[in-house]
Amino acid sequence: MSQDIFVSVLIPAKNEANNLKPLLEEIRVALVDESYEIIVVDDGSTDSTLQELRQIRQNGLNTLRILHHERSLGQSTSLYHAAREARGLWLATLDGDGQNDPADIPGMLALVRGEPGKVDVQLVA
């Protein structure tokens, strides 16, 4: 765990080449005022997911860390792998297909900081 990173966003991804760029941009916008890292685990993708991730990082998303499985090990193993590598005090998980809204993360972080009046979130698990 790094003192500089408050939250690690963990994303398992398999064949999500078309979804990751918009998702990572949404995370960047949602966490603009936070100290964070994003860890995406490419879980044996057969499309261009790994290449897309490398391009996104090369284009300046320096908070992005990429982990890669040569073959698919499943979502649970991917999240476990990401959690073991995470440096943040807190962990947030999102699916690689963009079905979860990154804009919900700041509200959850406000709750763990004891600032519940800032957001309308009832549960952090």
Image (cartoon, grey):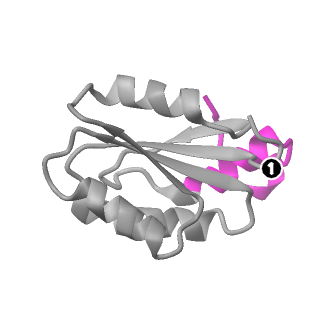
What percent of the width, then of the height, locates residue 28? 57, 67
Q: Is residue 112 magenta?
A: yes
The residue that mark 1 highlights is: 4
Where, by quadrant of the figure, is residue 12 drawn?
top left
Where, by quadrant of the figure, is residue 31 drawn?
bottom right
Task: Please count the marks in the image.
Answer: 1
Depth check: give the residue in front, 18 or 53: 53
What percent of the width, then of the height, locates residue 103? 56, 60
Residue ID at (35%, 55%): 98
Q: Secondary structure at mark 1?
A: loop
Depth check: give the residue in front, 51 or 3: 51
Residue ID at (53%, 62%): 27
Residue 55 vs 16, above or below: the answer is below
Residue ID at (57%, 41%): 92
Residue 95 vs 61, above or below: the answer is above
Q: Give the amino acid at mark 1.
A: Asp
What percent of the width, then of the height, locates residue 15? 19, 49
Residue range corresponding to the magenta coloring = 104-125
